[in-house]
Amino acid sequence: MRFLMMTTDDGSTPAGPPDEAMMAEMGRFIDETSKAGVLLATGGLDPRATHISSSGGKITVTDGPYAEAKEVVVGFALIEVRSKEEAIELSKRFWRIVGDGTGVIQQVFGPGDEFPGE
C-alpha cells in the first residue's frame, strides 16, 4: 500500500531554520526508511503554487501565492507500507523528530488498484 504523507502550513507554526540535532535525526530517519524500501520519494514544495482549473472546456492558470488559502502543502513523503496503521506510525515518528506542525496522510492508488468500497 502506498501513502502520501503531506506536511501542511497554516501559518500558525513559527518558521525558522531547523536545528542541527533535528537535521541529523531526520537524516537517520530518511536513511533508515530509504534502505528499508519504505520511503519512495520525499521533498519540500514551494508554497507559491500554480493553480489550474478546467470548467466547460476553459482552462485557467493562476500563479500563487494565495492569500485566501488556509493551509498549503509544503512537503511530502511517498511511502510503501503494509497498512494504514504502519503509515500512521511512520508519520508519528516524523512528527516526534520535527516537533509542532500539521499534516495529512492519504492512500495512493495506481493502475489496477481497487478503491475502497468497490
Image (tube, grey):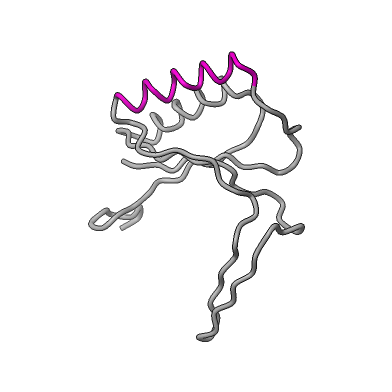
Residue at 75% from the left image edge and 59% from the top image edge:
68
Quarter placement of the N terminus: top left
From the viewer's perspective, is residue 37 above or below residue 106?
Answer: above
Quarter placement of the C terminus: bottom left
Region rendered in magenta: 19-35
**Image coordinates for residue 36, horizontal then vertical, percent:** 29, 24
Residue at 73% from the left image edge and 33% from the top image edge:
15
From the viewer's perspective, is residue 59 above or below residue 5?
Answer: below
Residue at 44% from the left image edge and 38% from the top image edge:
42
The image quadrant that residue 8 belongs to is top right
The image quadrant that residue 51 belongs to is bottom right
**Image coordinates for residue 69, horizontal then vertical, percent:** 71, 56
**Image coordinates for residue 61, horizontal then vertical, percent:** 59, 72
Left/right of residue 85 with respect to residue 66 in the rendered view: left
Magenta-highlighted stretch: main secondary structure? helix
**Image coordinates for residue 29, horizontal then vertical, percent:** 44, 21
From the viewer's perspective, is residue 99 above or below residue 77?
Answer: above
Left/right of residue 57 with respect to residue 62 in the rendered view: left
Left/right of residue 80 with respect to residue 14 in the rendered view: left
Q: Residue reaching furthest left? A: 112
The image quadrant that residue 95 belongs to is top right
Residue 18 among those drawn in magenta: no
Left/right of residue 98 with respect to residue 14 in the rendered view: left
Residue at 26% from the left image edge and 53% from the top image edge:
113
**Front-most of 4 and 29?**
29
Number of numbered labels in the structure image: 0
